[in-house]
Image (cartoon, grey):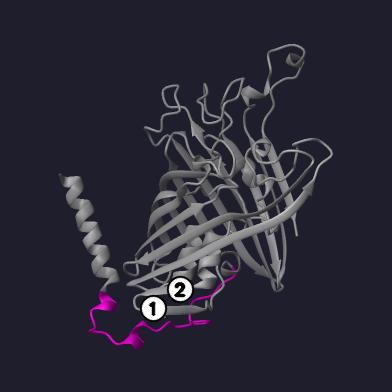
Amino acid sequence: MKARFVVLWALALLVCAFGVHADGNESVDQCACQQQCCGCSYDCADQFYYDCCGDCFCAGCVEFNSRYTYRMLSHVENLRKERVLLHAKRCGDIEPCRLYSGFSLIAIADYQHSNRTSKFGYLMRHPTSSNQIGKDVTEAVLHSMQFQFTGALCNWITVFGEYVYYPEQSFGAGTITTVTRNLTEGRKGYVLLGDLNCFPVYAAIGKMDTPFGQMFSVNPFTSSTMWHAFGGLAYGALLGYDCNGINASLMAVQGGAQFRAHNTPVFGTAVPSRLTNWVADFNYSFELCDICAQVGASYTRSSAYVQNFPVQHFNSGDRNNPAWTAYGQLRWCDWVLKGSFAQTTRVWPGTHNPNAPLDVFAAHKVSSFDVGA
């Protein structure tokens, strides 16, 4: 009963917060978007998370900001979306008592040829054999749709949600017309507490990318191999510090097998019944001769590489397998140079095949690196 009361109270608060501009007591001018290009305390860290001066369009108390929506929905640029949101608030692009929404749609058409039947290197198709038959394939399809909403209840409390429809990237069985591959997914959602204009500490709770490593890519078409190996998505609670180029993050991650890149055995199972995993990250941004630079390092108590042979994703393992990473990037005008390296601290048991003749190969650690410009 108490839980129902809390939910109803929260919904009432949302209605009151977002309905303030619809009661007719405030003029339309007060809902006008304000561009505050240089009205915030700008530092080098903004180069990595958010550029001020978004283009905004208002409709009542619902607003549309294309720059902000692109930054929040992009899967190849900065994945520290909580910091992107905080820096957008600091720039004035996200204001209190507003509901911001945005939409992205990607349609593609292509021709592909392979020298092996039904074997294609197109990364965004899982699995390829279900959707690509023969040596020549063509397609004209809807690749994905994304929708985001951001609600700023006040200066300190913001809620964010992202929904995704992506039949070509779904892990569901069958072809791209199968129902299991055509479902809408709540990709991310969290409550964010913080206002960098007043206090450098922030917190978030919900489903979000974990603060492990540098997961963005300079490739506009696909995520990096680093992200595919170690990019985390999980339930948890995040605590962060952001001031004068210094950013530190600590996230308590739900145990068991999470959505991506984190798996901590709970009583020998993959059941996420406890907060038994965590991720820590520290990075520093600074300016040197008109060049913005950032260096950082991360550590997680357990990566996803815990299973024994034969490997089944999302299954449990015997013990945790921690991982660490170091990364850096340079930005000058429109030029970007980045690099990172990540590795588990223990071997992945499942990389050893006990069956002859492959049993001669020992188990190995999992590592990944990327360099881009």
Q: Residue at x 72, y 73 (%)?
A: 289
* Category of crowding for the residue at label 1, using alpha-carbon neighbours closer than 10 angstroms: few (below 14), some (14–19), many (at least 20): few
Where residue 74 sits in the image (x, y, percent)? 57, 60
**Residue 31 marker:** none
Q: Secondary structure at mark 1?
A: strand
Most common secondary structure along the magenta stretch:
loop
Mark 1 and mark 2 residues within 8 Å of each other at the beta carbon: yes
Amino acid type assigned to the residue bearing label 2 in the image: Phe
* x and y percentages locating residue 347 in the rendered image: 64, 26
* Left or right for 373, reference 146: right
Q: Quadrant of residue 90?
A: bottom left
The magenta stretch spans which residues? 20-44
Q: Circle 1 sits on which residue? A: 59
Distance from label 1 to label 2 (Cα)? 8 Å
N-terminal of the two: label 1 or label 2? Answer: 1
Type of residue at label 1? Ala
**Observer-nearest of 243 and 65:** 65
- What residue would you read off at disc 2? 64
